[in-house]
Amino acid sequence: MTGLPLVSVLIPAFNHEAYVVRCLDSVLEDPYPAKEIVIIDDGSSDGTAARIDEWVARHGDAIAVEFVRRENRGIAATLNELAARARGEFLRLGASDDYFLPGGLDAQVRYLLAHGHKGAVIGDSIVIDSEGNRLFDSGMCDLHGADKRLYDSSDGIRRAVIAHWAIGGPVTLIRKSVLETVARWSEGLRIDDWDLFLRLAARDALGFIDVSVCAYRLHDTNLSKTRHTATRIINLAESRQVATRRTSLFDEPYRSLLRAQAQYIGAKIAFLQRRPARTALHLAAWALLVGVSKLRLPPSRTRVEGT
C-alpha cells in the first residue's frame, strides 16, 4: 500500500522493563506500513531504557525510531514532547506496559480519513494480566461497565465522556493538527486523559469504532493506584477540578451534566473521607443537576458514521 498517512506511535515509558519490549514488538508486528516510533524514557529507575536500547539495536533498520532518555517530568509533559517530536499526520497514543493489536492502526486511520470533521477516534481494548493472560474481552464493557450504544452518536459520546469515563488503555488515534485547536496535555495533571477528551468532546471532535485496538495490562503498579485510599482521594479531587474548569466549554444540557458529575465526584471524595452528611449534600446536588439537564433541549442527535 502506498500513499498512506504517516502514523507516529507515541510511547511514554516509565519503569516497565518487563513489558516495554512486548509493546515495541507489537508496533512492528502491526501490518500498517507507514509508521514510526517516538519513545521517551521518563526517568525510569529500572532497566526500561536498556531494554529499549537493545530493541532499537535489533530492529532499528525495520522501522524509524526516535528514542530519548531523560529525567522524570511526568506523563503530560512527556506526551507533549512526544507529540512535538512526531513527524506523522496522525498520532497513536501508547503505553509501555500495554501493547497494540494487529489491524488497529489501519482501522483507525481509515475512520479518520473518512470523517474529516473528527479530530480523534477511540477503540476498545482487551484486558490482560501481568503475565499476558486474557482477563476480559472488552475493557469498555467488562472492566468499566460501559454501554457501547452511547457511542453511536455525538450526543451519546459527549454524555459518555462526561458521566461514564470508560476508556481503558491506549486506544486513541489523534490528528496532530487537532492539538493546535484543543491545546495539548495539561502539564501537572494526573487526570490528563479525561481533560483532553472533555475538550475533544466539547468540539464534537471525537469518534468511535467498535474494534479492539490494544491489550490493556492490569498489574500491581496500576492496580495499587486505585486501591490506595489517599491516592484515590487525590485523583478524585483533581478530576473534580477538571470537571469544574471545563464546564464553560459545553452548551446545555452537557454543561449541567458536567456540573452534576463534579458533584458526584465530590460525593465519592466525602464517602472515602467518611463524611456522610457531606456525601448526602453532594448526591442531592448531583440529582438536582441531572434533573435540570433533562429539562434542557439537547441538540438534534447526530449519528457517528462508521461506528
Image (spheres, rainbow, N blue to C red):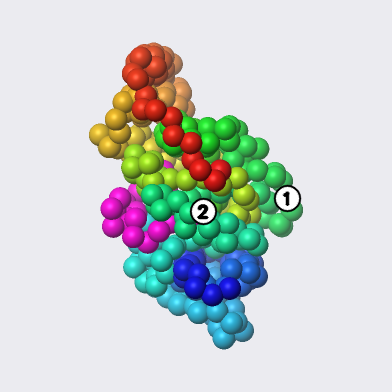
How many discs appear? Answer: 2
Quarter containing the C terminus: top right
For mark 1, what is the residue? 134
Marks 2,1: beta carbons within 8 A: no
Looking at the image, tell me whether mark 2 or mark 1 is earlier in sequence order: 2
Left or right position of 61 against 182: right
Q: Residues within 10 Å of mark 1 (few under 14, many from 20)?
A: some
* Residue at 60% in and 65% down: 23
Q: Nearer the viewer, residue 44 or 206?
A: 206
Q: Nearer the viewer, residue 260 or 29?
A: 29
The image position of residue 264, as x and y in percent, is 41, 25
Residue sitting at the far left = 248
Q: CA distance from mark 2 to mark 1?
A: 27 Å
Residue depth check, mark 2 versus mark 1: number of the one nearer the observer: 2
Q: Amino acid at mark 1?
A: Arg
Q: Amino acid at mark 2?
A: Tyr
Q: Is residue 259 magenta?
A: no
The image position of residue 273, as x and y in percent, is 43, 26
The numbered mark at residue 170 is none
The span picked out in magenta is 172-194
Up/down of 42 relative to 253, above or below? below
Up/down of 304 relative to 181, above or below? above
For mark 2, what is the residue? 111
Q: Nearer the viewer, residue 157 or 235?
A: 157
Query: Which quadrant of the structure image shows residue 2?
Result: bottom right
* Residue at 42% in and 75% down: 68
* Residue at 40% in and 58% down: 175
The image position of residue 284, as x and y in percent, is 39, 13
The image position of residue 96, as x and y in percent, is 54, 63
Left or right position of 270 against 223: left
Q: Secondary structure at mark 1?
A: strand
Q: Secondary structure at mark 2?
A: helix
